[in-house]
Amino acid sequence: MKALNIIAQIILIVGGVNWGLVGLFQFDLVAGIFGGPDSVGARIVYIIVGLAAIYGLYLLKPVSQGTGERTESIHAGPRPR
């Protein structure tokens, strides 16, 4: 599972850099590599980046304070005193 997390993070970084280039210079690197934004290759890359983003949302589970462990829910109930 750790390998999948690293791969998803790398894909998200590539997507973020691409969008940064689009915002700063109006240059879509993915479209430039694959021959346009409507090419099959570019669309596949866009889909993969989108799937990595959805997986990244899954990884954002809340972490309980102090233990560093993921919690099952934000509303886990009252804390003991």
Image (cartoon, helix red, strand yellow):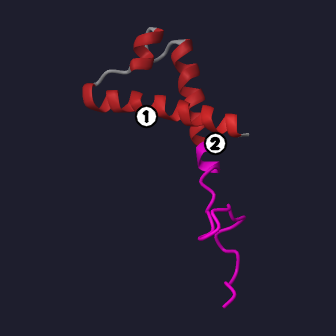
Residue type of the residue flagged with mark 1: Gly
Taking 26 as reference, is 74 above or below it?
below
Location of residue 18 by image quarter: top left
- At horizontal 47% and vertical 28% (from top left) the residue drawn is 14
Q: Is residue 9 visible?
A: yes
Q: Nearer the viewer, residue 37 or 17?
A: 17
Quadrant in the picture for the C terminus: bottom right
Residue type of the residue flagged with mark 2: Tyr
Quadrant in the picture for the N terminus: top right
Location of residue 9 by image quarter: top right
Q: Does the magenta run of residues contain 67?
A: yes
- Seen as rendered, the residue at the extreme bottom is 81
The magenta region covers: 56-81
Q: Position of residue 77 (x, y in %)?
A: 70, 80
Q: Position of residue 31 (x, y in %)?
A: 43, 16
Taking 37 as reference, is 19 above or below it?
below
Q: Residue tagged by mark 2?
A: 55
For mark 2, give the secondary structure: helix
- At horizontal 68% and vertical 61% (from top left) the residue drawn is 70
Q: Does the magenta run of residues contain 62?
A: yes
Mark 2–mark 1 distance (CA, rounded to whole Å): 15 Å
- Seen as rendered, the residue at the extreme top is 35
Indicate which disc residue 16 carries. 1
The secondary structure that dominates the magenta segment is loop
Specify whether 12 is left or right of 54.
Answer: left
Q: Is residue 51 visible?
A: no
Taking 50 as reference, is 25 above or below it?
above
